[in-house]
Image (cartoon, rainbow, N blue to C red):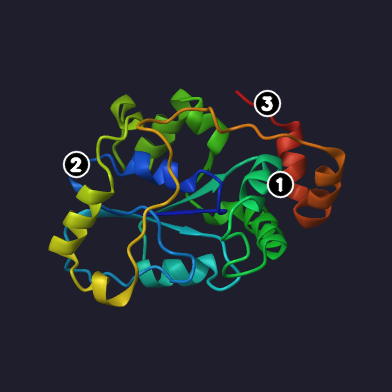
Amino acid sequence: MRLFVHGMQSSGATAFTLFLAQRPDCLALVDIPNNFAAPRIGRTLTKDMVVKAVITTAYPAAVHMERFRPDRTILLLRDPRDNYQSLSSKTYRNYSGLMDEKFVLLDQIFADRANFDAVIHYEDFVARSPQIIDTVNALGWAVDEGHYTYTRRHDEFFAALLEDLPDLYQSMEMVFGNVRGKEVDARFRDKPHDEDLERRLSDLCPRLLDHYKKRTIP
């Protein structure tokens, strides 16, 4: 099975994909660099694989999917107020598209979320809501409570990729996203909100902002 995860930079999509990648029998590209499209993987690969690509203006989701050809897809969402605050502090915020342009694109992807097999909210994930495991298992990707602890890390992922897909090292960079801690927790979930930020986001991603204003956060 091939599983594709898509989300905004600084949305927690890397942490979520790392959770998915705790299966000892899978290959994982936890963080495709923003200036690369998902790789083309031959059908001779027999192992399950999960990849994550962030939202950019350089590579639409359709490009990643056409290349990787996933069996199932997941859209990872985060409150845009928290997401914007987090991303605005990062040096890569304007890589592969200006930051504001990417939030406009995020709003359209959210509007078209029915194109994905599942939608996961970051807030539910870090709260360890039971529906996360139920949703992922329903896709056919087996996870359990133990996957909230990050036992498998980048050294194991990279070693497995080098063994099974060595050509990847010639065609793209290998990076590991900004995941803090040895397990999933909610310490970094909430960021300060203000009226100026809400006004900005009401122009950039009004539908996703409205969704989160109406949503009950666990």
Please name the residue shown 51% across and 43% down the image: 12
Q: Position of residue 191 (x, y in %)?
A: 67, 35
The answer, for residue 2, to whether it is visible in the render is no
Dot 3 lies on which element? loop
Quarter in which the C terminus is drawn: top right
Which numbered marker is on residue 24? 2
Please name the residue shown 65% across and 62% down the image: 102
Q: Residue furthest left?
A: 163
Q: Does the CB distance between marks 1 and 2 fall below 8 Å?
A: no
| Residue that carries the numbered disc 1 in the rendered image | 208
- The tally of labels here is 3
Q: CA distance from mark 3 to mark 1?
A: 14 Å
| Residue that carries the numbered disc 3 in the rendered image | 216
Q: Is residue 86 above or below residue 97?
A: above
Dot 2 lies on which element? loop
Closer mark to the observer between disc 1 and disc 2: 2
Amino acid at the residue labelled 1 = Leu
